[in-house]
Structures are given as C-alpha cells and as structure tokens.
Image: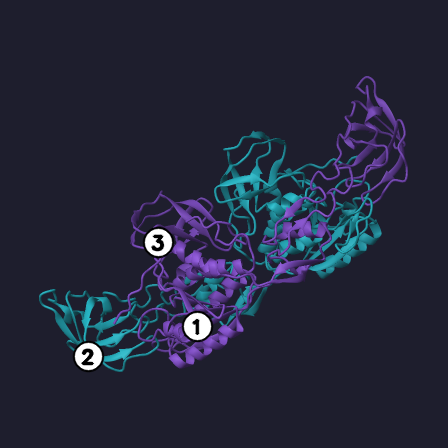
Chain colours: A cyan, B purple
Amino acid sequence: MVEHRKPIPVTEAVERVINKAQALGIESVALHDSYGRILAEPIKASHDVPPFNRSPYDGFAIRSADSAGASGDTRVQFEVIDHIGAGAVSGKTVEKQQAVRIMTGAPLPAGTDAVVMFEQTVDSGETFTIRKPFEPLENVSLQGEDMKEGDAVIESGSFIHPGTIAVLATFGYAQVEVAKRPVVGILSTGTELLDVSEPLVPGKIRNSNGPMIAAQLARMGIGCKTYGMSADELDESFNIVKQASEETDVLITTGGVSVGDFDFLPAIYERLEAEVLFNKVAMRPGSVTTVAVANGKFLFGLSGNPSACFTGFELLVRPAILKMMGADKLYLPRTRAVLAEDFTKANPFTRFIRASYDGSSIRPAGFNMSNAVSSIARGNALIVLPGGTRGYQAGASVDVLLLGVEEGASEWTL
Amino acid sequence: MVEHRKPIPVTEAVERVINKAQALGIESVALHDSYGRILAEPIKASHDVPPFNRSPYDGFAIRSADSAGASGDTRVQFEVIDHIGAGAVSGKTVEKQQAVRIMTGAPLPAGTDAVVMFEQTVDSGETFTIRKPFEPLENVSLQGEDMKEGDAVIESGSFIHPGTIAVLATFGYAQVEVAKRPVVGILSTGTELLDVSEPLVPGKIRNSNGPMIAAQLARMGIGCKTYGMSADELDESFNIVKQASEETDVLITTGGVSVGDFDFLPAIYERLEAEVLFNKVAMRPGSVTTVAVANGKFLFGLSGNPSACFTGFELLVRPAILKMMGADKLYLPRTRAVLAEDFTKANPFTRFIRASYDGSSIRPAGFNMSNAVSSIARGNALIVLPGGTRGYQAGASVDVLLLGVEEGASEWTL
C-alpha cells in the first residue's frame, strides 16, 4: 500500500522549520578566529573615527586664515617649524605664517585648520609659498567623519566578514561575542551504500551524500560528527538515530524517508515520538524531504537522491542552522537571470534546477534528474521555476538562488 | 620633492600580476579536507553513473513485452517472485508474467526492462495487475545516463565545492590531488599603528588592515603568517620585509608605499633589488598600490588606507594567489545592477565603491573615502565606475563585482 502524503508549499516548509529553530547561545572567540561567525553583540563606535582631525595628504598644515589673498601674482610664504609623520604628534603650536610639514594620517597640529598638498606649493625646505587661499578645514579628514562615538555600527546577528573585522579591530575587540555553532551529525542510510574507499560491487554505489553535506556545512564554517552509514534495518537504524540525536543539535540523515518497503525513517520518527513538521514538500527534487523535532533536536530527513539531498540542505537545513546562530540573513541570495536555453519540462511542483550563472544568464547544468550527481558538480546556482508552469524558453527571465555566497538574504522572497 | 609616478590602467595592473604568478605544486589531501581547495588533476568518470540500470521508483520490475495489450478493460496480471531494496541484487531471472518487487535505487533484475510504479497497479501481495502497456526501459534509470565511464567530468583547476565532492566520492577519491596553497605573510607598517588590544593614544589608531587581510585570506581558505607591525624606520622595516619575504611566497604589506617622507617601501624594494611591476594604478581607492617581485617572491604593497587596502587585495592579491594555485577562475564575479542612489563624484580614475547589492539594485555603503572603515563593514560588493566619467544618477545600470563568493569568474571583463 502506498501511503498518501499531502505536500505543503516550499515556502510553508521553510517557515515551519524556521519557527522551530532555537538560538543556541553565545561564546567568546579571538578576533583572528571570528571570520565567518555570527556576531552576538551589537557593535557601537567606542570612539570617533578618525579619532582626531588628520591630514589625508602629504603636505603642510597651516592656519587657513594666513593664506588669505594668495594668488599667482601674490604668493604667500610660510615658515616650516616642525615635521611629523603618521603616529607622531607635533609639540608645537603653529603661529602666523608658520606651518608643519605633515604626512598622511598625522593629526593636525595645534592652531592649524587646513592642509596644503605638496603639489600646491613651491618648496624650498625651510619655507614654501602658495598661490591660492585655503578654506578652514580644507584638505582635512575630520574627527568622526567616518563614525561617531556611540554610533550603532554593526548589528547583532551580522555575518562577520573581513570588513566587519576591520571595524572590530578599530574599536579594540581582541575578543568577540559570537553565536555558538550547532553540533551537526550526518548519517547516510541505505544498504546500497559503499564507503568512498570501497571498490564498486554489483547493486551498490558509493556514499556521495555524506561527504557532500559535510562540505555544505564546511562552507558555512560548520564542522560535523559523522555517523557513517547504516543499512536499511529498522532496529539498527533506530539505535543510531537515537544516539546521534542525543549527541547533536541537528541530525541530518540521507535516504529512507520515502514510502518504500525499506524506508525506515518514518517508523523511527514515530518510535522517537518526534514531531514531524512535514514529510512531503511541493518541490522537485526532494519532495520526500522530511523534517522532525525530537526532544528539541532537529532531525532533517533528506532524500537519498544526490541532487534532492543537496537542494534540501540548501533550502531547509541552512536557514535552520543560521537561525540557531541568531543570524539576520537566513536565506540563499536571490537574483533574476536570463535563461540561456529552453527548459520545456512541466513543473507540477516548484522546481529547483542546478545551473551555471555567469552574472547575467543562467544555464541548466546538464542532466537534471534528482538522482544526478554530475549537475551538482557543475552548478553554482539554482533556477527556481514555480509549480504549475511549463515551457520556459531561452530568453525568459527566471528566479535564481545563488550558492556559495558567504552572506545570505534576510527575506525568503519566492 | 614629489616623485612623479605614471599610473597604469587597472586591467594592465591585473595582467602584470597574473603574468608573474607561478604555480606552486601539488599535494594530496583527504576528501573530507578538500572543500575549498583547487583541484590539481582532471576527474574522469571511472565507471558509468548509474553503474547499472536501476529503478527510480518503488514498484515492480517487469518484462515490458509482457504488458502488451493491457488496458482498463483487459488488465494484465503478474506474479511477484522476489523482493529487493536498494543495495540488493535479485538472484532470480524474471520469466513471462513474472515480476520482482523493487525499491528505488535497486538494480533491475535479469530479464526485466521496465518498472511499474505502485500507483499504476492493483496489488494483492503475491500478484498485481496493470491497465496499460509499458515501453522497453520505461521508468528505468539507465546505466551511464548521468555520466559515462571515461567522460571528462571535472577539469583540473576547478574550485572544489560540495558538488565536486559528491563526484569525487562517487568515483572513490578518498584522497584528492590539490594545489598547494601559498604561504602568505602580512606586515602592517606605520608608526601610527596600535595593536587591537592596546588603548587608544593621541595621534594613533588601531591596526585594522592586518586583521582584515587575514580574514580576506581566510575566506579564500588560506592561512597566514603575521609579522605584526613595524614603525616607519627604514632599516628595521627592511630587515623585517627581507626576512618575511624569505619565509613566504607572498608578502602583503600595508602602508608605506606612497611618496611621503616616511614611506619606506619604495626604498626597501630598491635595496631588495626587487622588480617593481607598477607603483601607481589608475584606480580609486588604492592608486599607490605597488606590486614587486624579489627572488621569485611576491611583495604586495597595499595602501594603508583601509578601503584602498581592502580593494587592492580583492583586485590584485586574490587573483595572484588563485593563479599560483592553478585555479581556472581568478577574478571576482561580475554582474550588472541598478544604482539605487545618485553618485555624482567625478571619476578621474576607475572608481571602486563599497556597496550593498541585493540581487537587483546596488547602493553605495555610506561614507566612501579611501580612509573609511565603516563602508567596508557594510558592503558585499564593489560598484565599478570607469575613469573619465562623472554624474551617475539613481537608475543607471553599473558594473558590480561580488565579494565573498566562493568561486570566481574565468575572465577579467572590466
């Protein structure tokens, strides 16, 4: 007998998963280990940036009033009384017609309010002349022009990228509060599975989903516990799933979620008294993707078909993990692109097609069956075709989700 | 005296750097450590995928010829003689009007050439009937339909992403030949620099460029040796640069490359008898970016201004490192987007503006001076405005380079 499952829309599946994801807490890491983490505290400017009025050029700091009346015919002369580079502070106070030779980044000496660039002078060493008047604050980087003390600069929940780290360093964050990462386990189920190092034998294939998911986690900066492979035996699989779910925050299984005679995950969820959020999603590939929660732990039952497994991870597991880390951008970034070739299949469900995106057009990455491995290797994006459509021609504008981008989008817009 | 330098176009700067970058060699890593590396061997299919004709559904394998004449009025009956799941091989040969109950992923038993889905049967356990004839190979995943033995599947030089790993696992690559990563050093120069953990004092700022570059490397999967900070002292700086360049393949310095009184990198390049590829690029920010080669080692002299430093890394250091690893996609991916607000500054040189890209429009990330830190933190892309232009209005279509994308573009298209 075939069990009949009611498919829910992808958007609803994503919502149900997100609604169940709980924040995991906070830990402190060294700044130099913080790339790729999610910031768990808001960053305010602890001082003005720049912290003082400084010279953006190499030249001479002057009192602008002293330059009044300068012209090509009436050059005005200054006497150089000091010489400072970045990091130095002049001990002198500049008086009338005096100047300090100053390098980029150095603070304006007392009394000065403008900088004359070398190119604007005729320079004799001890003195120089200029041929135009300077406004107050001309050629000056003003204290606080980039950031003012107390400004909210970066929000909690932000992905820490290199620019974030520049700000954290500026404000003296040698340690940063970041979200804890979930402990994620991977268990590949299926009697047909061989380990990568085993020779091929009739009827079997090597386990590609386990290593692939580990890499999908790695590109999110997340490690994993690997529970290897289990044959399609109910008791054995139950015991492994039970143990693994106790040792992890998120357990990802592959295979065994359909309605076949040896698909034991539904029975395992029942034995665990798990709450099944859904067991059928109106999407291709991956319609049998099942998500359950047992004792507060996520159980993601991904399809054993490689591209269904891949897509299920990116659409459902990834945002759940990011939500658990308090991230403010949970979803794959979306854009629009021009379809580079016809795609004439019908789409009874929302269809996700592995594809190559070049910044303007997008081309399906070859053989697009849910059991295909080759197209996952070639694609860097997913084309999204809405359910209930068919017959997309080359030149059509389609929705695209981008893969392998460090920071996601804050809204699910499909 | 101001030294006059001749700026070269960005495109030429990139070319000169790429032309000097030399491949570093190959090493072997475990598959589970290979995410993010560059593949140093071409991958051919070592067997067909699927490796045998298999069932893509749960159902019954039959001889299609036996279904001839089946209709709603004339149901045709089959006897079930075996039952296999994925990973099992039936020992039986299917004869006339016989069938094997078969699960998704299992190989078709001898004699069979089609699969009847459960939904297409009336099933009594030992027998079932069907109401339509089946074609030879109907509902069969054909051996080799995804990949054929000997097919070139992935080229050497490819970035290893999760899909690549699925293919490598499929073909039994427990170890993978990948490009060696360069040893990269970072030295921040400038008397004004404080370490992140030091309190702010007058005239000084904390070193944000060093940690930022370390993170830019980290997002390429590359570690670094940190040579800390050196004051603007020629002999001291020379000694550190000399030692660091001997210990690394690539030494990145920040600051000291302009023509100020304490900018000692030009003198250091001279003492090292380095070949200076250029010391002025027609771009903003970062026009003073200097690249030199000494004893086969790269010396990247980035500007001390944070956003100039950031941009110099992404435009010049990143492709050089990728070329050293034999990657086939060296450049930041490019797209076009609609400018979300006016940008009316003149662009005497090619201008790179830190910006936020949302998949369709792009907005400058705030304060866009070369010494600004805040806009680096907010941006996920760079707007590129060609030199010799001014006055871009909101709504204009502009070139955009995407940051933080795992795989780049194969051509420099600006």
Chain letter for mark 1: B
> Mark 3 is on which residue type?
Thr
- Between B49 and B5, the residue placed more toward the observer is B5
Quarter of the image containing the N terminus of chain A? top right
Q: Residue furthest left?
A: A73
Alpha carbons under labels 1 and 3: distance apart: 26 Å
- Between B49 and A14, the residue placed more toward the observer is B49
Look at the numbered disc 2 and give the secondary structure of its residue: loop
Q: Which residue is mark 1?
A: B188
> Mark 2 is on which residue type?
Glu
Q: Which residue is mark 2?
A: A126
Q: Which residue is mark 3?
A: B350
The spot of residue A209 in percent (x, y) is 70, 50
CB atoms at circles 2 and 3 under 8 Å apart?
no
The spot of residue B343 in percent (x, y) is 32, 50
Query: Disc 1 vs disc 3: which is toward the camera?
Result: 3
Q: Is residue B365 visible?
A: no
Q: Is residue B8 above or below residue A367?
A: below
Residue at image position (32%, 64%) is A145
Question: Callout 2: few (<14), some (14-19), or many (20+) C-alpha neighbours within 10 Å?
Answer: few
| Lower position in the chain sequence, tag 1 or tag 3 | 1
Alpha carbons under labels 1 and 2: distance apart: 32 Å
